[in-house]
Image (spheres, helix red, strand yellow):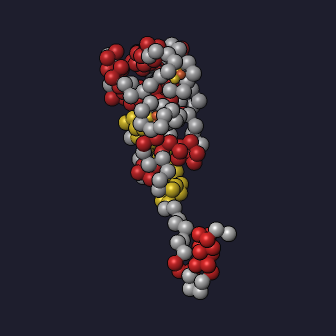
C-alpha cells in the first residue's frame, strides 16, 4: 500500500471521520411539462439534459440528429413554438410549457407533409442525415413566409450544413413545397 493510500484509509477509519468524507452529489432533476408533436407529456429530466437527448432518449424520437460538437451544423434543429431551435444547445428543462415539433410531427396521419414529399421527390435528401434539420428549418420559414424567394430560402437555411447534395436540390425542394402548399385546398 502506498503511503498516500495508507493515509486515506487511516483517515477514513478514524473515529468521527465519516462527517469529513465528501458525499457523492445527487444530480438535480426537474419535472418537465411540454407538448411534443401535439401530445402533452411530463417527464423527470436531469437539469443538465440537452433537448436533443431528451427527444431521442426519453421521448424516443430519433429523427432529430446530432451532427457536430454543438451549434454548427443545424442537424438537430426542431421547432419550439413554431421557431427553429438547435436542440443540441438547449436544455430540456428550459422547455417547460413550450410546444416542440420534430420532423416526425410534421407528417399528418402517416402521410408526409409537402416539405417531406418535396425532399423525397426532388432528391433534396441523399444520405439524409441533415434532412430533419433542413425540413424543420424550412417548415419554420414557410409558416412565416409562404412564398419565399430563392435568396430567402438560402438565408433561412444558412445554418444548416449538408455534405452530400450541394444545396441546389434542397433549395428546389423548398420551392416545390411552397408551390404545393399554395395549390393545396
Ligand atoms: S448537432 Fe446541433 S448544430 Fe450540429
Ligand atoms: S443529405 Fe447527406 S448530409 Fe445532407
Q: Quadrant of residue 3?
A: bottom right
Residue closest to the eye, 50 or 95: 50
Residue closest to the eye, 138 or 109: 138
Q: Is residue 18 left or right of residue 159?
A: right
Q: Position of residue 135 (x, y in %)?
A: 46, 26
Above or below for 14 versus 126: below
Above or below for 110 versus 17: above
Q: Position of residue 70 (x, y in %)?
A: 45, 38
Above or below for 35 versus 123: below
- Residue 176 visible in the current orientation: no
Q: Residue furthest bottom?
A: 15
Q: Position of residue 19 (x, y in %)?
A: 53, 80
Q: Disc count in the image?
A: 0
Residue closest to the eye, 160 or 117: 160
Q: Is residue 56 left or right of residue 47?
A: right
Q: Is residue 3 left or right of residue 89?
A: right
Name which residue lies at 59% across and 73% down: 8
Amino acid at each position: 500500500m502506498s503511503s498516500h493510500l495508507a493515509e486515506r484509509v487511516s483517515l477514513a477509519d478514524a473515529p468521527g471521520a465519516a462527517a469529513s468524507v465528501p458525499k457523492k452529489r445527487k444530480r438535480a432533476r426537474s419535472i418537465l411539462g411540454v407538448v411534443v408533436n401535439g401530445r402533452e407529456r411530463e417527464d423527470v429530466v436531469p437539469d443538465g439534459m440537452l433537448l436533443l437527448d431528451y427527444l431521442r432518449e426519453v421521448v424516443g424520437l430519433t429523427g432529430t440528429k446530432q451532427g457536430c460538437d454543438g451549434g454548427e451544423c443545424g442537424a438537430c434543429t426542431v421547432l419550439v413554438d413554431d421557431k427553429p431551435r438547435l436542440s443540441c444547445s438547449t436544455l430540456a428543462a428550459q422547455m417547460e410549457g413550450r410546444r416542440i415539433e420534430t420532423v416526425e410531427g410534421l407528417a399528418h396521419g402517416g402521410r408526409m407533409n409537402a416539405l417531406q414529399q418535396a425532399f423525397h421527390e426532388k432528391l433534396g435528401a441523399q444520405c439524409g442525415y441533415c434532412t430533419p434539420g433542413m425540413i424543420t428549418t424550412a417548415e419554420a420559414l414557410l409558416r412565416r413566409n409562404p412564398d419565399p424567394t430563392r435568396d430567402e430560402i438560402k438565408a433561412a437555411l444558412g445554418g444548416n450544413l449538408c455534405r452530400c447534395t450541394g444545396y441546389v436540390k434542397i433549395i428546389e425542394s423548398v420551392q416545390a413545397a411552397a408551390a404545393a402548399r399554395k395549390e393545396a385546398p
